[in-house]
Amino acid sequence: MAEPLWKLDATSLATLIQTGQVSAREAVQAHLDRLRAVNPAINAVVLTLEDQALAEADRADRARLAGERLGPLHGLPVTTKINTDQAGCPTDNGLAIFRNLIAAEDSPVVGSLRRAGAIVIGRTNAPAFSMRAMTDNALHGRTLNPWNPAFTCGGSSGGAGAALAAGIGVIAQGNDIGGSIRWPAYCNGVAGLRPSPGRVASFNGTATVSRRMSGQLMAVNGPMARSVRDIRLALSVMAARDPRDPLWTPAPLEGEPLPRPVRAALVTAPAGIEVDPAVVAAVRRAGTALAAAGYQVEEVAPPQLARAAELWHPIGLSDLNLTLRPAVKDAGDPGIEAFVNAWFELRGGYDLEDYLSALAERDTLIRLWGLFMETYPVIVMPSCAEVAVPVGVDTDGIAGAARMLNALQFQLTLPVLGLPGLAVPVEPLRGLPMGVQVVSRRYREDICLAAGEVIEAHAGIATPVEPGVS
């Protein structure tokens, strides 16, 4: 092979396995070897499933030799997140009190990956309760950004993003209620898709309480990968029906073709949000790529973007005040306790009237954005107001938490509006990854992916990287 197997994307590796040029065992072993080589430096995978993965790889090879029908992810090494049920593994969510909470069955998203032939080689790290924009917890420790450990790898799917960026696995499962797929994808220079709510079925049998309204409205599972075509491949598998999720929606993966030329809005000067000029330049570079491909590109912001982000707090924090806030007191995790306390001091204190008013206003904003996207079905916006955020900012008192929340405004907007968003990298800047978000209409992930592939083709793919080496 001209390239080590761990450097290939999922689509390329799948072709080699299905045509018999590479065995599933060789593919899995190459990624386990890569994990062993680089994971000690970044702590992205906190549970390695080597024996199980190799046994599954051998079964996959026997199946191919026997002429059995192969799934689209046959033999591909993937990772899953520690807050998502996988049979026989702890769903610890970064908490010592859950270290022995062993799942009896796969969650829908993990089950869909495995039924398609994927082989889970490890479980990736997340912050305690999966509710920080940094990946660090008292149980497993901090995950480091493989590009530069001084800057955050993001959260809560930070382990997933760092593992991919370092060449561990070809697809990673993540989830997102406030940016937890798109934010670590940005931080680690990989692609990540927040699907529309209901697109990917969700259920954890280990959960002891039902989903609160904020989770029903805003929380999704989705794929992360090093290429946009791999995101497309993973989504086609993850979107399978599962009767355990009553909110699963049987929407087609491909919608009607858009009228040409497709109009794309570039968000370069959003009212009420201060954005680093380098971030604006990244959005414009993405726009240049789209224009070269025939898109009609204009610099225009969708309505009330900052207000949409602000609505996350009365909706999300009202629920978290009943669940997360009491739990952090006994969690034994200073990081999550410091951030949550500062977060509630900055944005908490909502009553029932505030909560219901926010839900009503959300409906108005969804309509306004829907009308905007009748004209501009593609929106390209920043992932972060800053180029990169230093590690630990969110626990640096009130000022640090405020800086973190300000940086994440572009992440919070999409969960409130229930829209799909694709994080796609652009050219790195001074040794740090850069990227943008591509947004489109609900259940039109295909529009996001098409535009993302154009941006990716223009920028190139910079991962995997060697930890600490840009």
Image (spheres, rainbow, N blue to C red):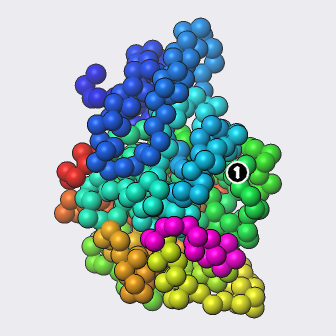
Residue, x 55% and y 42% (percent of image)?
Answer: 234
Q: Position of residue 52 (x, y in %)?
A: 53, 27
Residue, x 75% and y 44% (percent of image)?
Answer: 242
* Residue 284 occupies quadrant: bottom left
Residue 331 lies within the magenta run: yes
Q: Position of residue 53 (x, y in %)?
A: 50, 28
Task: Answer few, some or many: residues within 10 Å of disc 1's Cα (few below 14, many 20 plus, some between 14 and 19).
Answer: some
Q: Position of residue 396 (x, y in %)?
A: 37, 80
Residue 250 lies within the magenta run: no
Residue, x 42% and y 65% (percent of image)?
Answer: 134
Type of amino acid at the residue the image marks with label 1: Thr
* Residue 317 occupies quadrant: bottom right
Q: Is residue 394 above or below residue 160?
A: below
Question: Is 2 displayed left or right of 216 in the figure?
Answer: left
Residue, x 42% and y 45% (percent of image)?
Answer: 45
Note whether residue 282 is visible: no
Residue interval drawn in magenta: 321-335
Q: Is residue 62 above or below residue 222?
A: above
| Nearest the eye: 467 or 287 | 467
User: Would you name the residue on which mark 1 appears?
Assistant: 206
Identify the residue at the far top of this view.
66
